[in-house]
Amino acid sequence: MSIGDQVASAVSALLAGHLVAFPTETVYGLGADATNEVAVSRIFRTKGRPTNHPLIVHLAGIDAVDMWARDLPEYAWALANAFWPGPMTLVVNKRAGVSSLVTGGQDTVGLRVPSHPVAVELLDEFARRGGQGVAAPSANRFGQVSPTSADDVRSELGEYLLPGDLIVEGGNSHVGVESSIIDCTGIAPAIARPGAITREMVEAATGVELMEFDQRIRVSGSHSRHYSPRAEVVLDDAVEQGDGLIALSEFPTPPGAIRLLEAPSVEAYASGVYSALRRADQLGLGRVVAMTPPGEGLAVAVRDRLVRASHRRAGPVEP
Ligand code: TXA
Ligand code: MG
């Protein structure tokens, strides 16, 4: 099916209350009409995700912000103008009437305008046909590695989708790690989840020095174990025979190790890290060693996800 036909079917499915997994430049999302509570509640069941975890509402453009949010500080508009469409979510005060299922019962709502051409087309068409926004978390089971291809979504959620639900094909998500989440409810922005829109970029666009993020705001990726495969993930450790290895290209593959990612840049590292973790599980590896990329910028987001992936499953189960 052509992209245009896929998008038309996907929008019809969304408007009829079905779920649609679709590509974004960060990872694939599992979308529902954000104004349809029955459809939104299916997102939680399909992911196995607790309902107190808020969802991001995806919009066709900055003009749609006022349908969802109120009292944005000036720096939030500066960020929206600088980085949308793109891999950034803004947490802002919600308007009265926004479903508390979407916001996890909070007074704030997460908004994002993605840039992936298929997502852009889908959200434009959804808006043209009267839709206001598409609520979408990453299209993985709760706590698992985010999908960066339609095949990943099928293997994560295929058995949980219902007739009428769709998966839109859109190639690989090139950023590869989830959007930066910027809390815009205080006097200055705060990064709640690092991503491709970096601290340096946020400070340059707003001219405001960042605040530290207040952990009282609930960000699902902030659970200490998240994004984790079945294999044990260890960071910056000696690589042994039979281990999977994820590292920048400059790091050689020791004999007997299974190279899962050989990234020529931090961007390539981010883009490939989740599929490398998935491949470890497909190969049935017991242990993966990840050599973390150094430095600031996007490397901060890559290290954040690797640290979460490295937390062992043993011990108390996360809520
Ligand atoms: O790149 C992304 O952001 C992807 C694509 C599909 O857009 N989505 C994504 O969604 O990663 P999810 O649900 O896996 O992670 C979204 C994060 C969650 O940690 C959630 O808690 C946080 O955004 N979030 C959403 N609304 C929020 C709010 N009102 N306050 C605080 N955190 C919020
Ligand atoms: Mg997620």
Image (cartoon, grey):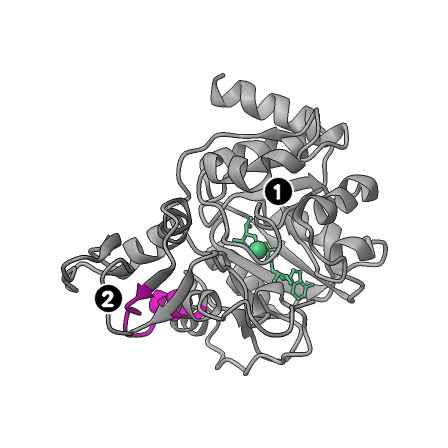
Q: Pick the residue in front: 76 or 231.
A: 231
Q: Given the image, on which type of amino acid does mark 2 rest?
A: Glu
Residue annotated with mark 2: 240
In this rendering, position of residue 172 left or right of residue 104: left
Number of other residues with Cα within 10 Å of mark 2, as a class: few under 14, some 14 to 19, many 20 or more: some
Which span is picked out in magenta?
A: 289-304
Q: Is residue 302 magenta?
A: yes
Residue 120 image point, x, y percent: 52, 37
Residue type at mark 1 is: Leu
Q: Which residue is mark 1?
A: 30
Is residue 57 visible to us here?
A: yes
> Marks 1 and 2: in contact by CB < 8 Å?
no
Say whether mark 2 is within 8 Å of ligand 2: no
Badge 1 local density, few (<14 within 10 Å), some, or many (20+)? Answer: many
Quadrant position of ligand 2: bottom right
Residue visible at 49% across and 60% down in the picture:
228
Left or right of 257, for residue 38: right
Residue 123 visible to the viewer: no
| Sequence-first disc among 2 and 1 | 1
Seen in the picture, residue 306 relative to 31 is either above or below; the reply is below
Q: Secondary structure at mark 2?
A: loop
Q: What residue is rendered at 66% in x and 32% in y?
A: 126
Residues under labels 2 and 1: Cα distance?
37 Å
Give the image quarter of residue 182: bottom right
